[in-house]
Image (cartoon, coloured by chain):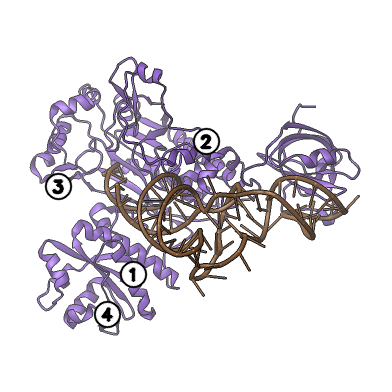
Amino acid sequence: MHAYRTHKCGDLRKDNVGETVKLSGWIHKKRDHGGVLFVDLRDTYGLTQCVVDEGSPLIDTIDKWHSESVITITGHVKARADETVNTKLATGDIEVYIDEVVMQSEADVIPFQVAEDDGTGEDHRLKYRYLDLRREKMQKNIRLRNNVIRSIRERMYAQDFQEFQTPILTASSPEGARDYLVPSRLHPGKFYALPQAPQQFKQLLMMSGFDKYFQIAPCFRDEDGRADRLAEFYQLDVEMSFVTQDDVFNTLEPVINGIFEEFSDFKGKKQSVTPTPFPRIPYRDVMLKYGSDKPDLRNPLEIVDVTAVFERDDVEFNAFKNVIKKGGVVRAIKAPGVGGQPRSFFDKLNSWAQGEGAPGLGYILFEGNEGKGPIAKFVPSEAQAQLREIAGLESGDAVFFICNLEKKAAHMAGLARDKICDDMGANGLPGRETGCYKFCWIVDYPMYELDEKTAKIDFSHNPFSMPQGGLEALNTEDPLEVMADQYDCVCNGFELASGAIRNHQPEIMEKAFGIAGYGKDTLEKEFGGMLNAMRYGAPPHGGIAYGIDRMVMLLADEPNLREVYAFVMNGQYEDLMMNAPSEATPDQLKDLSLKLNLPKPKVEGGEEEKKRA
RNA sequence: GCGGGAGUAGUUCAGUUGGUUAGAACGCCGGCCUGUCACGCCGGAGGUCGCGGGUUCAAGUCCCGUCUCUCGCGCCA
């Protein structure tokens, strides 16, 4: 007989009755009934109820062992009596009567329960991650992650993509985030950068003649965290040669749609997925209609521009008029059917807006043809008619206004759109849709944008993107009007992917960087390797990168990325289990020719407290 | 760097207007129980109320400072 097991803990069925079996696993739970003791034994595959029968000398031994101890039991399988069958358990028809037991690893009292999902605090869970990972939910989430990645690979292989590995110790890539740096011992004073993405390498692979590249690529960015943002994360990184934007979309849509169709029932209920082709929304439209370049299309509300109404001579609302004079715009959100809501519904939204830094959230509520509300008296009936026309308002609808400079107005309108939608949902009106994954492409991003602080022109997205219209557009058009073949893939308000058709011509590259104020020397110094490659025959190419963790997070219906990683840092980017980051020894620093110049220490208590915990 | 929320037993939380000895559930320890599978019953241990200062006859509760976690803003295109 095997040293540890003849079966897994999820295996045994009625067919096995009468067999002598060996199982190994963790003590999940014990139930002591005096004469008889039940032990739920758990492994990766399931749970089996084991019984120490009346009179067995093992009762006292096993009863003393703590939960989560690892044991091996040998016993014989018996059918349960009809009234004791447990239909909730896959192995619930049988139980194993223990004849022998071996303690493999005795557990101390555990700091929180594994068998039950209490709401243990996150820092605690991360410190004892190996215990946390034993819990049912985490086992399922990590398994989902495995399955999603396997399915991605199969789908990419099926389309003839080759998988590559690219360097981790490398140079800075063109993404704009802060790099993680690794000091070089052999080259004092010089540093490697960890890749923010394998951007240049995948383009170089195109120039190396590999045509279809993909990688489940680790990426590193040293910026502050968010629920959906970590220092290190994984991308489905893709690049293709001789392709247009349509080719990229046609390649990735079935992969992404397929993944979501395959796993969208993870939480037990099938969710609908946007069928291919995904809708495409130009950047300008999405900023106007949704106030964000990552719109949640489950929210049915849309934004319209009503500047024209408040510009009219017969409208005397100076709060808006003065902003319009300074170049501002007025955006309106139609909220259908809120006429029955109490005054507090509108007051709450107003104070929410003030909390977001806006002066308020003005509105007009229409009953019949008559506008009501604090602003209505400034808008005469003809202007109200124009407003109803533009926003498509009917009796019982309200319209909320945001007035500011265009960029700020769009942003605030986007926030208000979501807030109004959720408040409507909370008050029994149709709110955000549920049970669906709503995808779209955002296309036609501007190549450049104006930096508000410096008033300088800079790349708005990836500087390696191909400007629409090529060199001629860069030479003849206002740079702020030039679009790029740049695209994002958005799902339920999350930016899942970003990509572009790349610039493969050195002249265009020089011109494009020149417009953003980067000289030829900078370009050569930063990206000389790739620029050189372009001079020896570079195919037109393009690609995209999907955030794998975000996809798994959406499929697992989790509120943050930490729930879909096995080992992960906290919000401050500390690994509480491994104690990282940690100090370097003087010898290590000497090796690296580094001297520390630390900021003043914080008030004592912080570090001390952590050590005690 | 800024803002919101949180910090009380091992864990999750309650704690009224400032007022006696700070409670509950789960866990843990001891006892009982032959069929449970969220087992049940009896008993017990366990607290720097994050830390420091202040107000007060009296502070978990009020005030000030500070630390930590978390969500968001900035940042990340």
Mark closer to the observer (4, 3): 4
CA–CA distance between discs 2 and 1?
Answer: 43 Å
Q: Report the chain shown in brown.
A: B
- Residue B21, quarter of the rendered image: bottom right
Residue contact between numbered discs 2 and 1, judged by CB atoms under 8 Å: no
Mark linked to residue A51: none
Question: In the image, what residue occupies the spot 51% across and 47% down?
Answer: A122
**Residue hosting label 2:** A577
From the viewer's perspective, is residue A268 above or below residue A499? below
Give the labeled residue for mark 3.
Answer: A480
Q: Earlier in the sequence, mark 1 or mark 4?
A: 1
Q: In terms of sequence position, does the residue under pointer 4 or pointer 3 come before the other? A: 4
Instruction: Give SS at disc 2.
Output: loop
Q: Nearer the viewer, mark 2 or mark 4?
A: 2
Which residue is label 1 attached to? A349
Q: Colour of chain A?
A: purple
Q: Which residue is mark 4?
A: A373
Residue kind at label 3, given as amino acid type: Leu
Q: Secondary structure at mark 4?
A: loop
**Amino acid tagged 2:** Met
Q: Quadrant of residue A285?
A: bottom left
